[in-house]
Amino acid sequence: MNVTLPHDYRPSSDEPFMNSRMLEYFRRKLNQWRADLLSESNDTLQHLQEGGSLEPDIADRASIETERSLELRTRDRARKLIGKIDEALDRIDKGTYGYCLETSEPISLSRLEARPIATLSIEAQERHERMERTHRDE
C-alpha cells in the first residue's frame, strides 16, 4: 500500500484512529528514528575502533576508558531502542499499532508523537509504574 502524505501532515483526532495516512506517518517517523540511531551507532563504533592509543598519563588513560565505557552504554541503549522501534514497526504491519497492550484502547496521539514506541496508554503506564514502585518498596 503506497500512501502519499502532505509534507505538513500531522495526525489529528478529527480523523479515524490509525487510518492509512496515520499509520504511514508513524511508519516514516519510526524508520527515520531507526536510521538516525543506526547512523549514530556507526559513528560511535568508528570512534571506538580509532581509539586504541596508549596514553602514557594514567589520568588521560582513565579519562579515555570512562569515555569508551559511556559510548558503549549509549550504543547498548540505542540497540535496545532499535529493537523497540522494530517491534513498533511490526505492530504497524499487524494492525495493532497505537493500541494499548493491556486495555486495547487507543493510545493518545500526543503520547505516540512524543514516544512512538509506546505500548501502553498513559493510564496503563501509570498503573504499571505504581505496581513497580509497590513491589520495589516491599
Image (cartoon, rainbow, N blue to C red):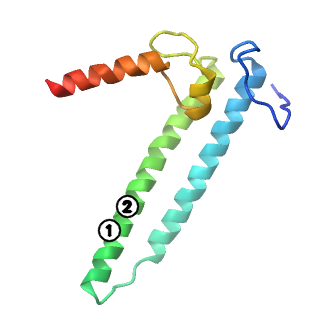
The spot of residue 115 in percent (x, y) is 55, 33
Q: Indicate the amino acid at tag 2.
A: Leu
Q: Indicate the amino acid at tag 1.
A: Thr
Q: Are marks 2 and 1 in contact (CB under 8 Å)?
A: yes
Question: Label 1 belongs to which residue?
Answer: 66
The reply, left or right, for residue 65 in relation to residue 35 is left
Label 1: few (<14), some or many (≥20) within 10 Å? few
Mark 2 vs mark 1, CA separation in Å: 6 Å
The spot of residue 3 in percent (x, y) is 83, 27
Residue 127 picture quarter? top left
Label 2: few (<14), some or many (≥20) within 10 Å? few
The spot of residue 83 in percent (x, y) is 50, 39
Instruction: For mark 2, give the secondary structure.
Output: helix
In the image, residue 135 above or below residue 14 = below
Residue 94 picture quarter? top right
Instruction: For mark 1, give the secondary structure.
Output: helix
Q: Is residue 47 visible?
A: yes
The reply, left or right, for residue 98 in relation to residue 72 is right
The spot of residue 23 in percent (x, y) is 71, 25
Q: How many labels, in total?
A: 2
Q: Is residue 90 visible?
A: no
Mark number displayed over residue 70: 2
Residue drawn at x 38%, y 67% is: 68
Q: Residue furthest left?
A: 138
| Quarter that holds the N terminus | top right
Q: Nearer the viewer, residue 83 or 64?
A: 64
Residue drawn at x 57%, y 53% is: 38
Residue drawn at x 32%, y 82% is: 60
Q: Nearer the viewer, residue 138 or 77?
A: 138
Residue drawn at x 27%, y 81% is: 59
